[in-house]
Image: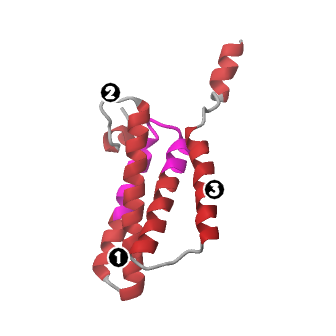
């Protein structure tokens, strides 16, 4: 047992990897979104509480991210997290800050999200090591 094993979050062994990966993506997006909102609050109003909470959110984000990589692929977790974060930020900009986007930008956002969804959900390729091992 290494030092990192003690510090990482452990998912129940009965949980399938897709469930753990999805939960990690949602947690990462939520933490990143919270950190972004705290950063905006600190930047606009100089709120020290927002600075501390934002830094804490990003510290916890790193811990959840590192823990998730024990269960799922780096690219899968990262892409899923980014897609969810982008959706959240666009919606918050729209509803909280009143940002109005023209129709063309909404179409572009839709195309990007569909492409990212494909990258996350499409069948993956096997790792090079497992392919090389089965060839011999």
Which sits in the foreground, 15 or 121? 121
Lateral position of residue 79 relative to residue 89, left or right: right
Q: Earlier in the sequence, mark 2 or mark 3?
A: 2
- What residue would you read off at disc 2? 13
Q: Report the predominant secondary structure element of the magenta stretch.
A: helix
Quarter of the rendering containing residue 10: top left
Residue 119 point in image, percent of width and height: 61, 44
Give the residue displayed 48% in from the left and 52% down from the top. Answer: 81
> Magenta region: which residues?
57-80
Residue 56 point in image, percent of width and height: 33, 65
Residue 52 point in image, percent of width and height: 31, 73
Colouring of the image? secondary structure
Label 1 to label 3: alpha-carbon separation: 34 Å
Residue 35, numbered label: none
The question of residue 61 being in magenta is answered with yes
The question of residue 63 being in magenta is answered with yes
Q: Number of labelled discs?
A: 3
Answer whether residue 67 is visible to the viewer in this image: no
Label 2 to label 3: alpha-carbon separation: 37 Å
Label 1 to label 2: alpha-carbon separation: 36 Å
Quarter of the rendering containing residue 39: bottom left
Which sits in the foreground, 135 or 115? 115
Quarter of the rendering containing residue 50: bottom left
- What residue would you read off at disc 3? 111
Tell us which disc is closer to us: 2 or 3: 3
Residue 51, numbered label: 1
Give the residue displayed 51% in from the left and 55% down from the top. Answer: 82
Tell us which disc is closer to us: 1 or 3: 3
Q: Which of marks 1 and 2 is nearer the N terminus?
A: 2
Give the residue displayed 35% in from the left and 57% down from the top. Answer: 60
């Amino acid at each position: 047992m290494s030092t990192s094993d003690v510090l990482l979050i452990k998912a129940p062994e009965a949980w399938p990897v897709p469930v753990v990966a999805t939960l990690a993506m949602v947690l990462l997006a939520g933490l990143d979104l919270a950190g972004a909102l705290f950063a905006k609050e600190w930047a606009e109003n100089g709120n020290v509480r927002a600075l501390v909470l934002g830094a804490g959110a990003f510290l916890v984000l790193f811990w959840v991210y590192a823990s998730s990589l024990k269960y799922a692929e780096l690219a899968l977790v990262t892409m899923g997290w980014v897609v969810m974060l982008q959706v959240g930020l666009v919606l918050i900009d729209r509803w909280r800050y009143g940002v109005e986007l023209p129709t063309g930008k909404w179409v572009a956002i839709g195309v990007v999200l569909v492409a990212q969804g494909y990258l996350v959900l499409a069948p993956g390729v096997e790792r090079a090591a497992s392919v090389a091992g089965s060839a011999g």
